[in-house]
Image (cartoon, grey):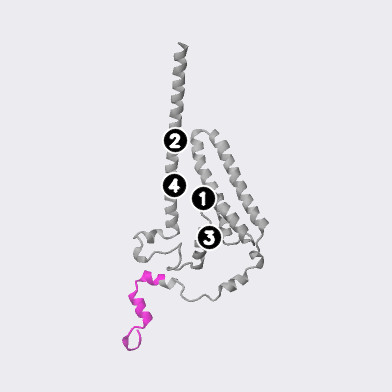
Amino acid sequence: MGAGGRMSAEERFEHQMPHEEHDELRRVPTAAPPFTLGEIKKAIPQRCFQRSVLRSFSYVVQDLAIVSVLFYLAIAYFPTLPSPLHLLAWPLYWAVQGCVLTGVWVIAHECGHHAFSDYSLLDDVVGLVLHSALLVPYFSWKYSHRRHHSNTGSLERDEVFVPKPKAKLAWFSKYLNNPPGRFLTLFILRNFVGLCVLVNALEVDLSANIVRGAKELVGTAIKVQSSR
């Protein structure tokens, strides 16, 4: 209590705010950090800011080579696998190939940041080609992404990761908006989608077997009829 039996501003704040919200507000840093971005940049070795065309293209060649090898293995050997195995092999291929292609997208992403080389034109050409191969627009993304980095965390100006006001959050958000909750959500969604794809693949495979069997039956009937 303050002088004269009155609460100080801090005591009144602690008394009025619920305990959980008060802890959350205390957790958020409101004071400026004891360092600047310039000081952080100076602490990084200068070699980390040197762009190399050869090194950058080596990553492109490496990733595209892995993509090509995985694609060749899939189309050359998956059809020779027994029926249950080749249906399980394709989802595994999608996951592995997706990881490698994400690396290709990251290279294109760095082109948009002008980190691929010292030449802006070369960065844009490589970024456009790689983004187009992945069916992702390049220049429109580049401009909006630059705006995002200029206004990261801004409720008014950021165009990408705009947090929702607390009043608009669903009741279950506090249970899912954490690492375990996000993992559970992605696990359920991706496995559900994968299961749907697998079921469709099974149906297609079953339909193909039925059609193949029907053709063989018709062919046999025609041969029998012609032999008579």
Q: Amino acid at mark 2?
A: Val
Q: Nearer the viewer, mark 2 or mark 1?
A: 1
Labels 4 and 1: the sequence-earlier one: 1
**Mark 4 → mark 3, Cα distance in angstroms:** 32 Å
Residue labelled with disc 3:
142
Label of residue 191 in the image: 4
Question: Which secondary structure type mostly characterizes the magenta part of the structure?
Answer: helix
Q: Secondary structure at mark 1?
A: loop
Q: Give the alpha-carbon distance from disc 2 to disc 3, as whole Å.
A: 40 Å
Q: Residues within 10 Å of mark 1 (few under 14, many from 20)?
A: few
CA distance for labels 2 and 1: 26 Å
N-terminal-most mark, 4 or 3: 3
Disc 2 secondary structure class: helix
Q: Are marks 4 and 2 in contact (CB under 8 Å)?
A: no
Along the polypeptide, which appears first: circle 2 or circle 3? 3
Is 49 rendered above or below residue 32?
Answer: above
Look at the numbered disc 3 and give the secondary structure of its residue. helix
Q: Is residue 102 visible?
A: no
Q: Which residues are magenta?
A: 1-24
Along the line of sight, the residue nearer the viewer: 105 or 192: 105
Gap between marks 4 and 1 measured at Cα: 24 Å
Q: Which label was assigned to residue 135?
A: 1
